[in-house]
Amino acid sequence: MNRGDIYWVDLNPTKGSELSKQRPCVLVGATPINKARRTVVVVPLSSVTKARPPLTIAVSCLNKKAIAICDQIRTVDKSRLRKSAGRLSAQDLIALDDGLRRILAL
């Protein structure tokens, strides 16, 4: 479970405006922490919205255009992870990092 890996994640149950259902998510936590903890920090991906940096960042997932929804970052238990869906390119991970820095005011 390396930083930048994409997994299908079951995000249900959710509340309010949280993204729901099973969807691909990017692991954004540090790799050593991903391996040591029973939880991982993820950013959900969607194919429905348009990129509006820094809230949403255009990326590629499963050879398709997708949007990383930076303001929906969340920690999930590893039991929610289903199967691997690939890995973000280095360029997409840099763009995602920039979006997260801006969302989190880092």
Image (cartoon, rainbow, N blue to C red):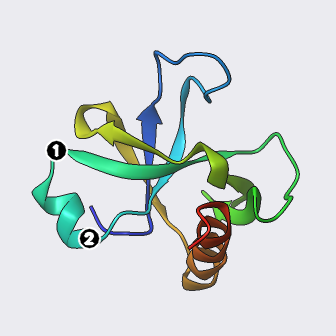
Task: Tell me residue 69's x, y (percent).
Answer: 67, 50
Under mark 2, the amino acid is Thr
Q: Quadrant of the C terminus?
A: bottom right
Relative to 22, does residue 88 appear above or below in the rendering? below
What residue is drawn where x is 45% and y is 51%?
A: 42
Mark 2 Cα within 10 Å, few/some/many (few <14, many 20+)? some
Relative to 50, does residue 98 appear above or below in the rendering? below
Q: Under tag 1, what secondary structure?
A: loop
Q: Nearer the viewer, residue 75 or 78?
A: 75
Q: Quadrant of residue 33?
A: bottom left
Residue denoted by label 2: 31
Left/right placement of residue 89 relative to residue 5 reads right
What residue is drawn where x is 68% and y is 24%?
A: 17
What residue is drawn where x is 11% and y is 59%?
A: 36
Left/right placement of residue 18 relative to residue 84 reads right
Under mark 1, the amino acid is Arg
Q: In the rendered picture of this protein, how many numbered marks are placed on residues? A: 2
Residue denoted by label 1: 38
The residue lying furthest to the left in this view is 36
Relative to 46, does residue 27 appear above or below in the rendering? below
Task: Tell me residue 31's x, y (percent).
Answer: 26, 70
Q: Which label sits on residue 70?
A: none
Task: Tell me residue 11's x, y (percent).
Answer: 47, 28
Q: Nearer the viewer, residue 88 or 77?
A: 77
Mark 1 Cα within 10 Å, few/some/many (few <14, many 20+)? few
